[in-house]
Amino acid sequence: MPTIKYYLREGLLPAGVLTSPNQAHYDDGHLRRLRLVRALVDVGGLSIAAVREVLTAVDTNEESMHHKLGAVQEAISQPATGELDPIAVKDVQAFFDRHGEFEFFGVDESNVTGMLVSALSAARSVGHDHFPELLDSYMEAMRIVARADLEYIARRTSSDDIIEAMVIGTLIGDAVLKAVRRVAHAEVSREAMDTD
């Protein structure tokens, strides 16, 4: 695990106030930034270069918190992998068009778009060409999740704390959503298919 000195050398943490030639004092702001860096590296799995980009976005005064959160979401999302089906690209573009609020960014421009196109390409490759029919229902459910996520991070006060909560909430939340989805599958399946 990288040390605090390493993070300092890489410019991810600001220098502390020197109290002697070999010691420095660090305040609560340093601790918040350290937690954010550790969340991005340890939980998010980001490279030091990617963490630096995220921190640059976080520290930019001109951007709104909405844009900062978007930059972080892009950074913690995996880029497109595997062979991408052109029909899957069109399906994703149509999905964005239906929901009007979103500008479609191509796979080369957006990791989030790339993740969705990769997933739909994989579905098509195994014969599930109609999987995009689920996207609108998924979007409806995910809006509820997104509102819960935003309520969770809104309790924070500093920019670093908000970003850290969003990173942790998204990455840990993804794992929690998988598990809860499986619980819901069991419940709905029992209701719909259990004829005994």
Image: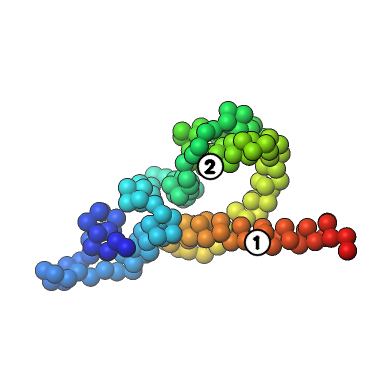
Q: Secondary structure at mark 1?
A: helix
Q: Amino acid at mark 1?
A: Val
Quadrant that contains the N terminus: bottom left
Q: Position of residue 33 (x, y in %)?
A: 35, 61
Q: Residue at x 23, y 62 (%)?
A: 5
Q: Which residue is mark 1?
A: 180
Quadrant that contains the C terminus: bottom right
As measured in the structure, the alpha-carbon distance from the residue carrying label 1 to the one carrying label 2 is 21 Å
Q: Residue at x 37, y 61 (%)?
A: 38
Residue 25 picture quarter? bottom left
Q: Residue furthest right?
A: 196
Q: Secondary structure at mark 2?
A: helix
Q: Using residue 159 as the reference point, say whether residue 6 is left or right of it.
A: left
Q: Which mark is residue 115?
A: 2
Report if residue 39 is visible in the image.
yes
**On screen, 7 above or below 107?**
below
Q: Position of residue 188 (x, y in %)?
A: 77, 58
Q: Position of residue 114 (x, y in %)?
A: 52, 38
Q: Using residue 113 as the reference point, say whether residue 158 is left or right of it.
A: left
